[in-house]
Image: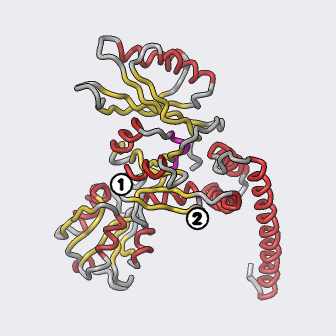
Amino acid sequence: MIMTDVNLTELRAQIDAVDDQILTLLNARGRLAQSVGHSKGATPVYRPEREAQVLRRLTEQNAGPLTAGSVSILFREIMSACRSLEQPLSVAYLGPQGTFSEQAAIKQFGQSATRLPVATLDEVFRAVERGEAHYGVVPIENSTEGVITRTLDLLLDADLVICGEVFVRVRQNLMRRVSDLEIDLETIRVVYSHAQSLAQCQGWLRQNLPAAEQVSVASNSEAARLAAERDDAAAIGGELAADYHGLQLIARDIEDATRNTTRFVVLAHEAVPPSGRDRTSLAVSISNRPGALVELLAPFATHGINLISWNTRPARNELWEYVFCVDAEGHANDPALKAALIDLEKTVAFLKVLGSYPVAVQ
């Protein structure tokens, strides 16, 4: 079909009319959010279980042509903007600006939340505990490199709970301060990046930059900053880091594992109610005696609870004693998991619910 100027003008007029309707409806939603905020009083404006329910409903009802991912992104931003009408939120994350942690914070809370970059994972926890930020976002595991042990250790001691999770597809890119037309890799003498990012791109680096020195730095954003200072340097990281430091992407998606993903968790003071599709993180310690591990697993089997992941950390107070960090399907208030935890508490030396939270809407 040949598109005429008349056809195009008519279609654009229809788009304008739809845009006008969308704007009217968005403001109507904003006014309703304000009314909800007034009725809540002092209760938190961020309700991860409610937002998860909304996103699931909309993505499941979506008939296209927009993808479920696009619908999820659009409505997260709508909810972020409406939430800011009730109360501006602050979110601490592992900085500096341009890290994958910031990308996770944006994905979970939208652009309307105030983002607070801090230097270490410990400082993310402290910022939330001290009330300097309402929430925190920290990485907990990577599909290629495994669990983030420091996050687990901090969760064991913190007076905080996990209230949400978010997955970020880790797309590693080679960036430098030249234009797209000047992409000669032979002029690159040094490559800066975080140690994990360098490890995730070893195959590509061996094949394409075998002679370049690889320098590990504190973050991919710091790598981008350093690369911006030298003509013979490049950095590996996400697009956000390139944007912040004015670098050009000269090679995209250079990670060896094409589905490399990092899982982040959201830290809060308040536990959240069930959403209908939840995960619970636990820390458990058992006595060092025969059969203790079987007794630990028995309540989950008895009550039909599926265990998703299992990690081991050394106990701080006893030599050669260990704490098991376990993720289970369901919410701690669900009848089956609640019964399993009651039975478990009778047999273990230590039990801490690190948080029950909605399964991430991908």
Label 2 sits on what residue type?
Answer: Gln
Question: What secondary structure is marked by label 2?
Answer: loop
- Res 178 quadrant in image: bottom left
Q: Position of residue 314 (x, y in %)?
A: 29, 31
Q: Residues within 10 Å of mark 1 (few under 14, many from 20)?
A: some
Tell me the magenta residue range. 161-167
- The quadrant of the image that shows the N terminus is bottom right
The reply to whether discs 2 and 1 touch (Cβ–Cβ < 8 Å) is: no
Question: What secondary structure is marked by label 1?
Answer: loop
- Seen at 39% across and 19% down, the residue is 349
Of labels 2 and 1, earlier in sequence is 2
Q: Position of residue 212 (x, y in %)?
A: 19, 70
Q: Is residue 228 left or right of residue 187?
A: right
- Seen at 45% across and 48% down, the residue is 263
Instruction: State whether residue 34 is above or below residue 181.
Output: above
Disc marking residue 224 = none
Residue 278 versus residue 116: which sits nearer the camera? 116
Q: Most prominent secondary structure in the magenta stretch?
A: strand
Instruction: State whether residue 68 is above or below residue 96.
Output: above
Q: Residues within 10 Å of mark 2 (few under 14, many from 20)?
A: some
Residue 39 on the magenta span: no
- Res 153 quadrant in image: top left
Tell me how many marks there are. Answer: 2
Residue 163 on the magenta span: yes
Label 1 sits on what residue type?
Answer: Thr
- Residue 171 visible in the current orientation: no
> What residue did someone put label 1 on?
120
Q: Position of residue 292 (x, y in %)?
A: 36, 14
Q: Position of residue 209 (x, y in %)?
A: 23, 69
> What residue did someone put label 2 on?
111
